[in-house]
Amino acid sequence: MIVRPKHQRLILIILAAAALVGAALLAMWGLKDRAAYFVTPSDIAAGKATPDRAMRLGGMVIKGSLRRDPDGLTIRFTVSDMKAETPVVFRGITPDLFKEGNGVVAEGRLQPDGLFVADNILAKHDERYMPPQMAKEVSAR
């Protein structure tokens, strides 16, 4: 059977499209558990955050809320977005810029009881950092 050049190009285009779709599906499947959605304490209070799902919690560390456990590695603090508050627990070494009154992004999972268990704490180099949702509200005041 002889395949004409016109048909060869069509077959190659169909195979390339199928390969692209397959690669995109594989990438999405591989990243589905790694995707972290950004939430605020208000989102959690409104029930918009699903427990036991990877997410990033952004807000300000409330002054006077930072407590260190006797083990020296576990810290507990409360994050606020000026509308709601969420308690956070983190076990590990915090960034140097992490302190009360500063902005923070905590990566982790929300527990069914409302406690956010952070796996990682991110601090921005600029001490005036605020999550985007909070910056809009502060600028509106």
Image (tube, rainbow, N blue to C red):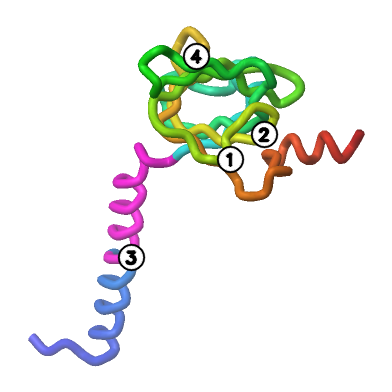
Where is residue 111, by image quadrant?
Answer: top left
Amino acid on which the number 4 mark rests in the picture? Leu
Q: What amino acid does circle 1 point to? A: Leu
* Comparing labels 3 and 2, the label whose residue is closer to the camera: 2
Q: Are marks 1 and 2 in contact (CB under 8 Å)?
A: yes
Image location (x, y in percent) of residue 35: 43, 41
x, y (%) of residue 36?
46, 38
Disc nearest the viewer among 4 and 1: 1
Q: Which residue is mark 4?
A: 115
Pick the residue in front: 130 or 41.
130
Residue at image x 67%, y 34%? Answer: 102
| Quadrant housing the C terminus | top right
Residue 136: name its quadrant.
Answer: top right
Q: Secondary structure at mark 4?
A: loop
Question: For this rendering, which residue is in front, 60 or 68?
Answer: 68
Q: Which residue is mark 2?
A: 102
Q: Name the residue beneath numbered marker 3.
A: 20
- Comparing labels 2 and 4, the label whose residue is closer to the camera: 2
- Residue neighbourhood size for the residue with mark 3, other residues' Cα within 10 Å, grouped as few (<14), some (14–19), many (≥20): few
The residue range painted magenta reads: 19-35
User: Which numbered disc flags the more N-terminal residue, 3 or 2?
Assistant: 3
Label 2 crowd bin: few (<14), some (14–19), many (20+), radius 10 Å? many
Above or below for 114 versus 17: above
* Left or right of 98, for residue 11: left
